[in-house]
């Protein structure tokens, strides 16, 4: 009896953990539909916003690059550089600027030695997002005697990784806060209601939380 209860609890926790990126993505889509096409009143692009933040932060060694690779819109601590997709690099919507500002905020964290291993963790979560369906299948096809143990182990792994990913989200929020503060100090967010600005930077943070869904093969198959 207790095994059945533990299994149900594990399945619930594991299911919630696996659904977290999808839920973040649905919230992101909702915000994008609401304010995603609002152009920045000041008229600067995402790349210009990132460069302004870097200049205000007195960070000269970080480049802002346009890239068309499969993975874009991230801060590379190893180069160091901000890698923007063409849409973000040239985009002039409030959401494009907020996304670039959040990434520039990671450069500010790097300057202050508060970045940690965020880039490596994001890469790992993308790998996990692409690999967990195969891992789940491997556990499902285990021998009957070890099936329950395998499923509980899988759910425990999923729950632990989701908890760590959610905890590290504070680092993402801090980067967005730093980038937003620099843009606000330069009066580049003037002319927008508080709600629009809040939603834009919330969306910029949710993009990271949704990585294990948006950057996966099955996420593309399921559709967005």
Image (cartoon, helix red, strand yellow):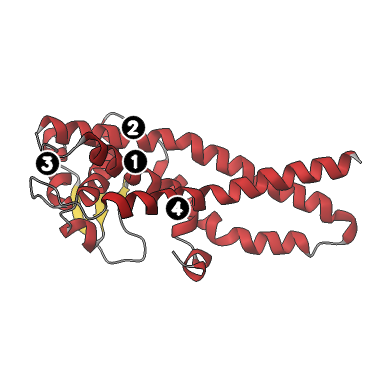
Quadrant placement of the C terminus: bottom left
Closest to the observer: 81 or 162?
A: 162
Residue 177 is labelled as none
Q: Which tag is nearer the camera, tag 2 or tag 4?
A: 4
How crowded pointer 2 is (Cα within 10 Å; few <14, some 14-19, many 20+) is rated as some
Q: Residue shown at 83%/52% (left/top)?
A: 148
Residue corresponding to mark 1: 202
Closest to the observer: 101 or 83?
A: 101
Q: Which tag is nearer the camera, tag 2 or tag 1?
A: 1
Q: Residue shown at 28%/44% (left/top)?
A: 200
How crowded pointer 4 is (Cα within 10 Å; few <14, some 14-19, many 20+) is rated as some
Q: Residue shown at 34%/41% (left/top)?
A: 202
Tell me residue 30's x, y (percent).
38, 51
Comes first in the chain, label 2 or label 3: 3
Left or right, residue 178 beside residue 184:
right
Comes first in the chain, label 3 or label 4: 4
Q: Mark 2–mark 3 contact, CB under 8 Å?
A: no
Residue corresponding to mark 2: 174
Residue 52 is labelled as 3
Comes first in the chain, label 2 or label 1: 2
Q: Which tag is nearer the camera, tag 3 or tag 4?
A: 4
Q: CA distance from mark 2 to mark 4?
A: 22 Å
Helix, strand, or loop for circle 3?
helix
Q: CA distance from mark 2 to mark 3?
A: 18 Å
Helix, strand, or loop for circle 4?
helix
Q: Indicate whether 114 appears above or below 62.
A: above
């Amino acid at each position: 009896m207790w095994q059945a209860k533990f299994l149900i609890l594990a399945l619930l926790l594991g299911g919630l953990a696996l659904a977290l990126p999808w839920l973040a993505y649905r919230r992101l889509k909702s915000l994008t539909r609401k304010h995603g096409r609002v152009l920045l009143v000041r008229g600067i692009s995402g790349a210009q916003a990132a460069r302004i933040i870097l200049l205000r932060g007195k960070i000269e060694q970080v480049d802002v690059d346009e890239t068309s690779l499969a993975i874009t819109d991230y801060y590379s601590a190893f180069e160091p550089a901000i890698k923007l997709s063409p849409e973000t690099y040239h985009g002039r919507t409030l959401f494009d600027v907020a996304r670039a500002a959040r990434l520039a905020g990671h450069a500010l964290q790097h300057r202050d030695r508060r970045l940690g291993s965020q880039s490596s963790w994001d890469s790992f979560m993308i790998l996990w997002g692409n690999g967990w369906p195969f891992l789940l299948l491997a556990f499902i096809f285990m021998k009957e005697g070890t099936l329950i143990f395998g499923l509980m182990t899988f759910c425990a792994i999923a729950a632990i990784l989701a908890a760590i990913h959610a905890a590290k989200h504070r680092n993402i929020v801090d980067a967005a806060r730093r980038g937003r503060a620099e843009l606000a100090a330069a009066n580049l967010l003037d002319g927008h209601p508080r709600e629009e600005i809040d939603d834009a930077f919330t969306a910029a943070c949710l993009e990271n939380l949704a990585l294990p869904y948006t950057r996966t093969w099955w996420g593309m198959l399921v559709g967005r």
